[in-house]
Image (cartoon, rainbow, N blue to C red):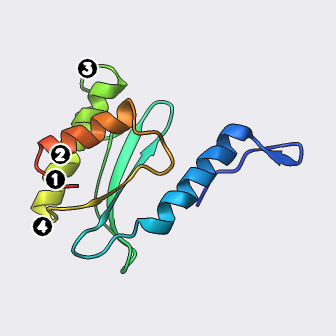
Amino acid sequence: MAITLRIGKKLADRTHAKTRRQNRLRKSIKGTPERPRLVVTRSSRHISAQVIDDTRGLTLVSASSMEAAVRGASGDKSAKAKQVGKLLADRAKAAGVEVVVFDRAGNKYHGRIAALADSAREAGLGF
């Protein structure tokens, strides 16, 4: 579930800290059919988000900055994250999902993560 980068016999400090944050969050955050989990995955260039029902292990909807509609758009990475959030919220509402539990996957709630979450809220997704 977590990414491990080994330097000698120790985990890299940054990766180890992110893994600890992920595990701490996943203890309390579970997706149910009434309130699925919205998990955000961030790389250096792209961002993707999925709405997951953990009881069935099923991805209900997903959106990514690698899709053609978002990739061709102009703007910086935060602007593209906002577009991904709006796209995800529209797809979730079409699938019948109104309320989700937000899982930031160990990332800080700042920058692109916050932009995605705020635009999903503005588009009508509750969390």
| Image vertical order of residue 20 relative to residue 108, above or below | below
Residue 95 screen position, x and y as percent:
15, 65
Q: Are marks 2 and 1 in contact (CB under 8 Å)?
A: yes
Name the residue type under label 2: Arg
Q: Closer to the N terminus: mark 4 or mark 2? A: 4
Residue 85 numbered mark, or none: none
**Residue shown at 37%/45% (left/top)?**
48
The residue furthest right is 8
In the picture, measured across the screen, residue 49 lies left or right of residue 100, that is right
- Cα separation between marks 2 and 3: 22 Å
Element under disc 2: helix
Residue 74 numbered mark, or none: 3
In the picture, measured across the screen, residue 121 lies left or right of residue 78, that is left
Which is closer to the viewer, label 4 or label 2?
Answer: 2
- Cα separation between marks 3 and 1: 24 Å
Which is closer to the viewer, label 4 or label 1?
Answer: 1
Name the residue type under label 1: Leu
Element under disc 3: loop
- Cα separation between marks 4 and 3: 30 Å
Q: Are marks 4 and 2 in contact (CB under 8 Å)?
A: no
What residue would you read off at disc 2? 121
What residue would you read off at disc 1? 125
What residue would you read off at disc 4? 96
